[in-house]
């Protein structure tokens, strides 16, 4: 199917097409398509634009990435289908590693996702042959690379389930989550939650990392200190306000 450029929902339909193609290529799973639908519903409520609280979270996330000694970007089937080049670009700018991590894991799917990232310019992709485990996690997402997520001090993830976010936080890592649902367990448990659509948030985050690069450690530390709970409340207020303005 080709989406007409003048369609009012062109961007949203293109996203769906990318995911459908990802599904056909064995990159995205059918459950991932459902997860995307949940995200789309929240994006309507948010206004399909990056809200102020999300911008504040992006600034804190950029400072956190710059302060990290070993940042890792976790990639799943949805993000690999939607935005491989954006993930690779952020990894390069933030000096972060890329690691495949899947809930519905198969070696073949992990290998395909790694190939997509390499095609988008990644030199190295971890997680195809994971040799370590996240403690207290039973899903396949517990399988991680020893010199990747297992050893990372900062992990950036998107479109993720709450169990692993919680397990990573319990391991003492700072977790940056991109999630359209401010009420999800991931959003609630992460250290910094960017409540925004992943393909909107990633370029903004990359720009912010470039912008903050010259700051001192003390300045970065000030920007990285972040009250996630207060920011999520601000995001919920943003949604409530929008809904009350839209009321007939
Ligand atoms: P949790 O376990 O954290 O409560 P969940 O059960 O909703 O989350 P999933 O089903 O894995 O977990 O959902 C993935 C999350 O990703 C959802 O909160 C959804 O809103 C969000 N999401 C889906 N698509 C996007 C997207 N394109 N950008 C950002 N977030 C998205």
Image (tube, helix red, strand yellow):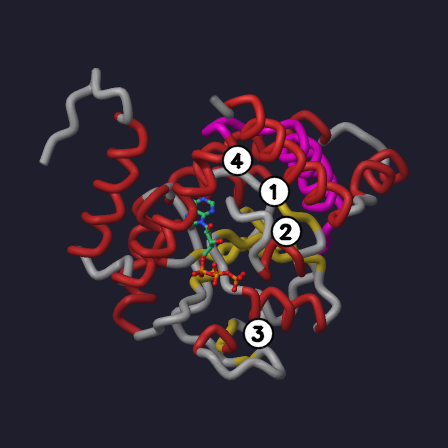
How many residues crowd mark 1 within 10 Å: few (<14), some (14–19), many (20+)? many
- Residue named by callout 2: 176
Is residue 243 shown above or below 147? above
- Residue 88: x percent and y percent? 45, 43
Q: Nearer the viewer, mark 1 or mark 3?
A: 1
Q: Is residue 97 magenta?
A: no
- Residue named by callout 3: 146
Q: Nearer the viewer, mark 3 or mark 4?
A: 4
Sooner in the amino-acid sequence: mark 1 or mark 4: 1
Relative to 149, 5 lies left or right = left
- Residue named by callout 4: 201
Disc 1 to disc 4, C-alpha distance = 8 Å
- In the picture, the disc for residue 34 is none
Residue contact between numbered discs 2 and 1, judged by CB atoms under 8 Å:
yes
Outermost residue toward the front?
A: 248
Residue contact between numbered discs 1 and 4, judged by CB atoms under 8 Å:
yes
Disc 1 to disc 3, C-alpha distance = 27 Å
Magenta-colored segment: predominant secondary structure: helix
Disc 3 to disc 2, C-alpha distance = 20 Å
Sooner in the amino-acid sequence: mark 1 or mark 3: 3
């Amino acid at each position: 199917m080709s989406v007409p450029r003048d369609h009012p929902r062109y961007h949203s339909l293109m996203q769906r097409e990318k995911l459908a193609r990802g599904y056909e290529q064995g990159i995205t799973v059918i459950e991932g398509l459902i997860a995307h639908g949940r995200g789309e519903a929240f994006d309507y409520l948010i206004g399909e634009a990056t809200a102020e609280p999300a911008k504040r979270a992006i600034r804190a996330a950029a400072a956190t990435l710059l302060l990290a000694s070993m940042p890792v970007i976790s990639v799943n089937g949805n993000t690999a289908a939607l935005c491989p080049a954006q993930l690779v670009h952020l990894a390069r700018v933030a000096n972060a590693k890329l690691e495949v991590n899947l809930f519905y894991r198969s070696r073949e799917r992990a290998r395909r996702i790694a190939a997509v990232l390499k095609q988008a310019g990644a030199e190295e992709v971890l997680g195809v042959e994971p040799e370590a485990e996240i403690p207290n996690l039973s899903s396949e997402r517990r399988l991680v690379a020893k010199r990747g997520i297992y050893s990372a001090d900062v992990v950036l993830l998107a479109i993720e389930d709450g169990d692993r976010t919680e397990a990573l936080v319990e391991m003492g890592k700072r977790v940056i989550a991109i999630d359209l649902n401010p009420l999800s367990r991931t959003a609630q448990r992460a250290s910094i939650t960017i409540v925004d659509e992943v393909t909107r948030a990633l370029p903004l985050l990359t720009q912010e990392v470039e912008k903050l690069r010259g700051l001192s450690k003390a300045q970065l530390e000030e920007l990285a200190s972040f009250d996630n709970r207060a920011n999520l409340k601000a995001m919920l207020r943003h949604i409530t306000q929008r809904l009350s303005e839209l009321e007939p």
